Image (cartoon, rainbow, N blue to C red):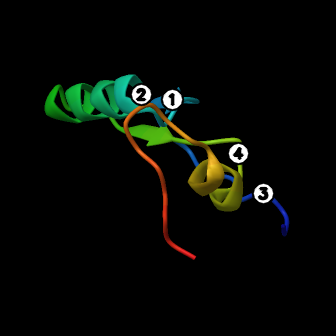
Amino acid sequence: MGAPKIITTQVANMRAGPAGLMLSHLLAKAGRESTVTKVRSHKEISETVRTGFWNTAP
């Protein structure tokens, strides 16, 4: 990973799950700028088994 990118926003949403994405959507509808971040890597997220979903991609 390189140096973190610095951005300016009205709201920082530190959760990118269903609730966090819905919050970002509702903020956008209300005219508020927001940024959604996820701490875990793409590899870690794609390998996490969720109820009713199994990632079978190589």
Q: Which residue is mark 4?
A: 40
**What distance separates the C-alpha of mark 4 from that of mark 1?**
14 Å
Q: Are marks 4 and 2 in contact (CB under 8 Å)?
A: no
For marks 1 and 2, give the one nearer the viewer.
Answer: 2
Decide if residue 40 is on the left or right side of residue 16: right
Mark 4 vs 2, N-terminal side: 2
> Around disc 2, counting alpha carbons within 10 Å, would you say few (fewer than 14), some (14 to 19), or many (20 or more)?
some
- Which amino acid type is shown beneath numbered disc 4? Arg
The percent coordinates of residue 34 (x first, y second) are 41, 37
- Which amino acid type is shown beneath numbered disc 2? Gly
Mark 2 vs 3, N-terminal side: 3
Task: Specify the farthest residue to the left.
Answer: 29
The percent coordinates of residue 23 (x first, y second) are 32, 24
The percent coordinates of residue 21 (x first, y second) are 35, 34
Q: Are marks 3 and 1 in contact (CB under 8 Å)?
A: no
Mark 4 vs 1, N-terminal side: 1
Q: Which residue is mark 3?
A: 4
Helix, strand or loop at label 2? It is helix
Helix, strand or loop at label 3? It is loop
Decide if residue 7 is on the left or right side of residue 3: left
> Around disc 3, counting alpha carbons within 10 Å, would you say few (fewer than 14), some (14 to 19), or many (20 or more)?
few
Quadrant where the N terminus lies?
A: bottom right
- Which amino acid type is shown beneath numbered disc 1? Asn
- Which amino acid type is shown beneath numbered disc 3? Pro
Task: Specify the farthest residue to the bottom.
Answer: 58
- Residue 20's disc is 2
Quadrant where the C terminus lies?
A: bottom right
